[in-house]
Image (tube, rainbow, N blue to C red):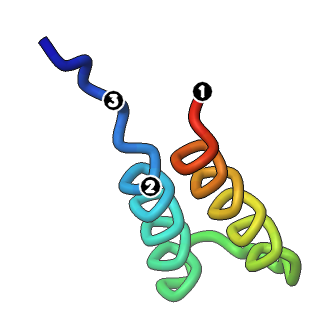
């Protein structure tokens, strides 16, 4: 049996997409210039977890 893993990348992309859509529709206002840095850090964490093992 293989243990199913939570689709972390898909969840992050979904959250970013929803926030981006709500911002473009002027439903919410987010002025955070460091969001790309947070996304890069999350991506590096996901990559290192996958290739460095647990």
Which of the 4 image quadrants contains residue 13? Answer: bottom left
- What is the crowding at mark 3: few (fewer than 14 residues within 10 Å), some, or many (at least 20)? few
Instruction: Compute the Cα span from label 3 to label 1.
Output: 13 Å
Residue under label 3, please give it.
5
Q: Nearer the viewer, residue 50 or 36?
A: 50
Judge whether 18 appears above or below 10 on screen: below
Instruction: Compute the Cα span from label 2 to label 3.
Output: 11 Å
Q: Which mark is residue 9?
A: 2
- Residue 22 appears at what percent x and percent y? 50, 73
Judge whether 48 appears above or below 33 on screen: above
Q: Is 1 left or right of 13, judged from the image as shown?
A: left
Provide the secondary structure element on which disc 1 rests: loop
Q: Which mark is residue 54?
A: 1
Judge whether 52 appears above or below 4 on screen: below
Look at 25% across and 18% down and name the residue there: 3
Provide the secondary structure element on which disc 2 rests: helix
Which of the 4 image quadrants contains residue 21? Answer: bottom left
Which residue extends farthest top?
A: 1
First of labels 3, 1 by sequence position: 3
Query: Answer yes or no: do the residues labelled 3 and 1 have beta carbons within 8 Å?
Result: no
Look at 82% across and 74% down and name the residue there: 37
Query: Answer yes or no: do the residues labelled 1 and 2 have beta carbons within 8 Å?
Result: no
- What is the crowding at mark 1: few (fewer than 14 residues within 10 Å), some, or many (at least 20)? few
- Residue 9 appears at what percent x and percent y? 44, 55
């Amino acid at each position: 049996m293989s243990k199913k893993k939570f689709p972390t990348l898909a969840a992050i992309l979904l959250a970013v997409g929803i926030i981006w859509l709500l911002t473009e529709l002027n439903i919410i206002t987010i002025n955070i210039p460091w969001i790309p840095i947070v996304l890069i850090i999350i991506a590096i964490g996901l990559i290192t977890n996958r290739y460095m093992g647990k």
